[in-house]
Image: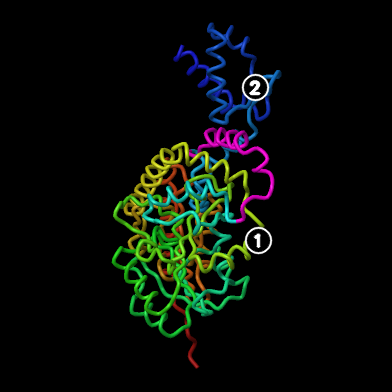
Amino acid sequence: MSSKYSRIMADMKRRLEEGLLTAGSKLPSVRQVSEDYGCSKNTVMKAYDELEKEHVIYSVPKSGYYVVNEFQKAREELEVIDFLSAGPDKNIMPYVEFQHCLNQAIDQYKEELFTYSDQQGLYSLRVELVKYLQNLQVFTEPERLVVVSGSQQALHLLVSLAFPNGKNNILIEQPTYFGFIESLNLQQANVLGIELTMEGIELERLEYMFRNNDIKFFYIIPRFHNPLGHCYTNREKKKIVELAEKYDVYIVEDDILGDLDPDAKADPLFSYDPSGRVIYIKSLSKVFLPGLRIGTVVLPALMMNDFLRAKFCSDFNSSALSQGALETYLKSGMFNSHLKKVKEVYRTKMHLVQEACEALLPANTQFSRPASGFYLSISLPEHVKAKQVVQMLHEQHIYVDDASRMFLPQYKKENLIRLSISQVNESQIKLGIKMLADCIAVLDSRKNHRKPPTFLPI
């Protein structure tokens, strides 16, 4: 039976690839296929069920099975090499499992999920999030958690919020996450930068900034930094927290990719001062389903009321339906097994990208070497501009990111590109890096072979 239903699946996929079945078209009936293949209707049903789980087809009650409209789009996407998109790998997202959790949540909570809910977030979800955060060495209690509509919301609200230290300036790494720079610009915040490289930041410089610049909080991405891929050591993280305590500076820790850390001994900054000096933000968008728009922030008790007032003005409360389904998913244990798969996928992709960079990139380029995460950065030859590389590759359907938008104006570098490994197919990585290397070589050659200017005698 097994070989028959596998053969049916393979044949249907082949017909789709060859265009014999097109998007939206109806598949042969179960009876017809069972006659064609000389098998039982149950065998055909099993083949169709598996195809439906893979989102290749969908069923319409009392009508039959149809080809999903996304299939041909997926074929076209295979021709694209995407080092730009920073969402999670679509091939490992647990759509079917989470659909069951949505149904269970609706059955369990019913009208509670479709009315206004606890502004701080469903208490039962916060209990599950506390357990989840313990695996990341963040030990807290449900009363200090606020469920937010993704980490971006928490960051945006914190920019304008008054902090207990009464200070006004915000310090950020340079470069850093573009979405936070946008929030700072939109709210016309007072912002200062400190240079970050793969060797880290100068702690003496950080102390000078803390001591002399009225810093409200320091925004930091300590693990698998966006865009560099940098990770701080535990010693550095401990020293940063000590300096923040000494100079009454708060730390906003964006640990969005902390789940992917293969180093079990790596700690968040929060673990060095859980009392409230470090505000910890965690989103599931990079390892789970970003469309849920669910994240959490751990706040000191004395900031809770002001933060909730700001959130009330923003959206009243985050989606109760998403919260209920996520609670069910976390409680079931499915998230932990999903996370193991996710960690392996991204670690493998990161290794393949670095292997290809080592073998193929020109000698006068440099690239970062994170152990996992989503991002690595490539420093181009000084006179090769990132925007030129982006444009040339775009014409060949290869997408990379110009990191210049991730800098404040006074720190801007125009020869840094960011690669995101999350949505590129493993089979396309080597080809993509080869074409990137060729592009850099061509642009570098153009610059190096320009004739020197001819000066006419006066």
Please tell me whether mark 1 sits on a helix, a strand or a loop: helix
Crowding at label 2, few (<14), some or many (≥20) Cα neighbours within 10 Å? many
Query: What residue do we see at 52% from left, 43% from top?
Result: 327
Identify which amino acid the numbered label 2 is placed on.
Tyr
- Number of the front mark, 2 or 1: 1
Q: Is 390 on the left or on the right of 356, as rendered?
A: right
Q: Which mark is residue 173?
A: none
Q: Residue 132 placed where, x, y %?
A: 43, 48
- The answer, for residue 123, to whether it is visible in the render is yes
Q: Is residue 84 magenta?
A: no
Give the residue number, with chain letter if any, for mark 1.
Answer: 312
Residue shown at 41% from the left, 62% from the top:
228
The location of residue 191, given as percent across then percent down, is: 52, 77
List the residue tagged with mark 2: 65
Q: What is the quadrant of residue 160 in the picture?
A: bottom right
Looking at this view, is 168 or 29 the one in front? 168
Q: Is residue 87 above or below residue 299?
A: above
Report how far apart the C-alphas of labels 2 and 1 lie in the structure.
Answer: 45 Å
Between 185 and 154, the residue placed more toward the observer is 154
The magenta stretch spans which residues?
92-119
The answer to whether residue 443 of the structure is visible from this angle is no
Q: Is residue 97 magenta?
A: yes
